[in-house]
C-alpha cells in the first residue's frame, strides 16, 4: 500500500465515539483476556506474576484503544509499549508463539467490542467501521 488517504470526518466520529465506550470496557476485557490466555496455556501464569500481567495487559489495551482514534502525527505509544512488553516477556521466558497469541487475541477482543459498540450506538456506521478495518489491522507502524 502506497500513500494512504486521510480519514473522513465520519470515520473519525465513529472511531472516537466507539473508543470512548471501549476505554470504559478495558478492565473487563483485561479480565477476560487473562482468563482466556490461562485456558490456552498455563505457561502465562508460570512466567508472569498475575498482578503484573493484569496491569500490563490493561495498559497495553488502553494504549491500543487510544491509538484507534489518534491522529497520524500522534506518537504510537501502543507500538512502543508492545515492544517493551515483548522484551519483558522474553526475559521472563515466555515463548514467542504465546506472546504473539496474546497480542492477536487482545486485538480480536478489541475488534469484537468495536463491532458490538458501533452496532448498538450507530448501526448505520458499521459500513464505515468495516471500511476502516484494513487500516486498523495494518501491522505497519504508521497510523491512518
Image (cartoon, rainbow, N blue to C red):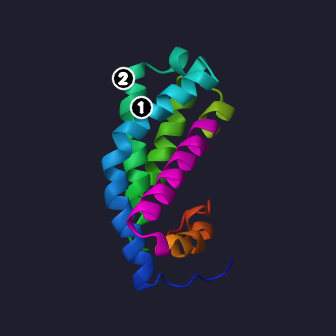
**Residue 55, image x and y in percent?**
35, 32
Q: Position of residue 39 (x, y in %)?
A: 59, 22
The foreground one among 82 and 118 is 118
> Depth-wise, is mark 1 or mark 2 nearer the camera?
1
* SS assignment for the magenta stretch, majority: helix
Which residues are the magenta region? 101-124
Q: Is residue 68 visible?
A: yes
Q: Give whichever of 8, 73 is nearer the camera.
A: 8
What is the count of numbered marks?
2
Q: Quadrant of the N terminus?
A: bottom right
* Circle 2: element type: helix
Neighbor class of circle 1 (other Cα within 10 Å; few <14, some 14-19, many 20+) is few
Going from N to C along the chain, the mark reached first, 1 or 2, is: 1
Assess whether residue 2 is covered by the magenta stretch.
no
Please say if 105 is above or below 52.
Answer: below
Residue 73, given in percent of the width and then of the height, sits at 40, 73
What residue do we see at 47% from left, 52% from top? 113
The image shows residue 119, relative to residue 3, as above or below, that is above
Q: Which residue is mark 2?
A: 51
Residue 77 occupies which quadrant of the picture? Answer: bottom left
Query: Which of the two residues, 134 or 116, is positioned nearer the viewer here?
Result: 116
Which secondary structure, mark 1? helix
Mark 1 → mark 2, Cα distance in angstroms: 11 Å
Image coordinates of residue 22 in percent, x first then y, are: 37, 53
Pointer 1 residue: 31
Name the residue rendered at 53%, 54% in the picture. Answer: 111
Amino acid at each position: 500500500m502506497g500513500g494512504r488517504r486521510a480519514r473522513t470526518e465520519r470515520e473519525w466520529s465513529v472511531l472516537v465515539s466507539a473508543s470512548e465506550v471501549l476505554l470504559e470496557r478495558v478492565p473487563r476485557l483485561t479480565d477476560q483476556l487473562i482468563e482466556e490466555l490461562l485456558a490456552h496455556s498455563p505457561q502465562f501464569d508460570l512466567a508472569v506474576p498475575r498482578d503484573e500481567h493484569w496491569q500490563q495487559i490493561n495498559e497495553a489495551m488502553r494504549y491500543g484503544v487510544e491509538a484507534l482514534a489518534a491522529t497520524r502525527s500522534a506518537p504510537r505509544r501502543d507500538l512502543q509499549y508492545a515492544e517493551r512488553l515483548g522484551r519483558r516477556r522474553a526475559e521472563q521466558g515466555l515463548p514467542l508463539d504465546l506472546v504473539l497469541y496474546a497480542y492477536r487475541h487482545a486485538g480480536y477482543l478489541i475488534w469484537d467490542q468495536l463491532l458490538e459498540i458501533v452496532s448498538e450506538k450507530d448501526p448505520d456506521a458499521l459500513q464505515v467501521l468495516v471500511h476502516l478495518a484494513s487500516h486498523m489491522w495494518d501491522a505497519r507502524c504508521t497510523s491512518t
